[in-house]
Image (cartoon, rainbow, N blue to C red):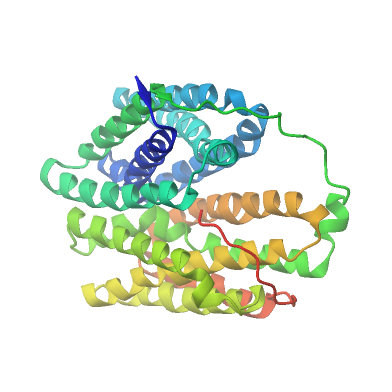
Amino acid sequence: MELRSTRWLALSYFTYFFSYGIFLPFWGLWLKGEGISSESIGLLLGAGLVARFLGTLIISPSIKDPSHLITGLRILALLTLAFAVGFWFGNGWAWLMINIAGFSLFFGPLVPLTDALAGTLQRQINMDYGKVRVWGSIAFVIGSAVTGKLVEVYGHNAILYTLTAGIAAMLLGMLLRPSVKPVGEPRESGAPTISWKALLGEKPVWRFLLCVTLLQGAHAAYYGFSAIYWQDVGYSSTTIGYLWSLGVVAEVLVFTFSHQLFRRWSARDLLLLSAVCGVVRWGMMGEFTALPWLIVVQILHCGTFTVCHLAGMRFIASRPRDQVIRLQSVYSALAMGGGVAIMTMVSGFLFEHLHAGLFWVMALLAVPAIFLRPNVTPSAPAETAS
């Protein structure tokens, strides 16, 4: 069966982020339902994030010819489904570690490769990327909201059932044929002229990387343990799903209107705003559990995550062209991968012993970023939502 290329891409984004909207908020809750301790949950989720980082770093760049992108996506979707099914056959420590590592290793590269396919098709056909990509954000909201309701009715295993169904739907959608096949020259593998030592030795660069790693790493407690914490204080899975959805809605709105809101802001200004939002958000999360406060906490996601990411894109775009590729890769590796992975492992131990105090630790983690912000010249680059 053939599908118009824009619809093929929209379906791919939709099914991926529908599945991610199940996995990210609720996988810790599923592990808890299987009798796993908080410390072990932190280690398992952290290992998954490390595997996701390695998959994105190693697998994504290995596909250099655009004509091979669709085949690569299909293979990755099949392998992801195999490991999702693997969770059905046991809950022993070693088995869970193998499956979460394998699942994350192959699930992680799907979005950068789909983005690469979208970029290739944009050069071949008249396509509005934003209108296609937005279906991913919509799907995340639906996935987290629906799963919360299903867990309340059917118990924690609804998370695994729904995740498996979402991954299977993603694979089936990718097996359809897009009307336009990607063509183009293989991506060049030539390295930038600047060395790693010279790049990371620049004061603005290492200060920037430290800031964003602290600010994004502070989300580890939220990603791994917010659902467990809110359930422990009495909230239903349905309410938890709605709270997660609210955070994503706030994120999408700020991404959509970022040019109007922050046109004159420098990366340094944006990092200050994100750090202040981080201190306020995580402090509130550790102090309050009443629903009106949690609504404010979730709206602040657009400040802690989105504004920080916009600062990252703005800082990178302000650098010399020979630094951009390497700086983008190390930003993704540290801020969006390694920092969150390490803090997730630490969060498991802290949650076991501090419970709500874990979020105060995350608030403290954001404080140094206020003083470490690099001095940069304001610029007006184009931002893209992640």
From where the camera sits, is residue 229 visible?
no
Viewer-nearest residue: 294 or 180: 180
Rendering quarter of residue 289: bottom left
Position of residue 185 measured from the top left corner of the image (x, y, whole percent) = 71, 29
Q: Residue at x 46, y 69 (%)?
A: 257
Q: How many marks?
A: 0
Position of residue 300 measured from the top left corner of the image (x, y, whole percent) = 40, 72
From where the camera sits, is residue 309 visible?
yes
Q: Is residue 13 left or right of residue 159?
A: right
The single residue placed furthest to the left in the displayed view is 153
Viewer-nearest residue: 282 or 307: 307
Position of residue 55 measured from the top left corner of the image (x, y, whole percent) = 58, 35
The single residue placed furthest to the top in the displayed view is 1
Viewer-nearest residue: 337 or 131: 131
Q: Residue at x 88, y 48 (%)?
A: 193
Position of residue 275 measured from the top left corner of the image (x, y, whole percent) = 55, 75
Q: Residue at x 30, y 63 (%)?
A: 246
Q: Is residue 367 above or below residue 148?
A: below
Q: Is residue 242 above or below residue 289?
A: above
Viewer-nearest residue: 138 or 76: 138
The single residue placed furthest to the front in the displayed view is 126
Rendering quarter of residue 116: top right
Q: Residue at x 52, y 21 (%)?
A: 71
Of the 4 image quadrants, the one containing the N terminus is: top left
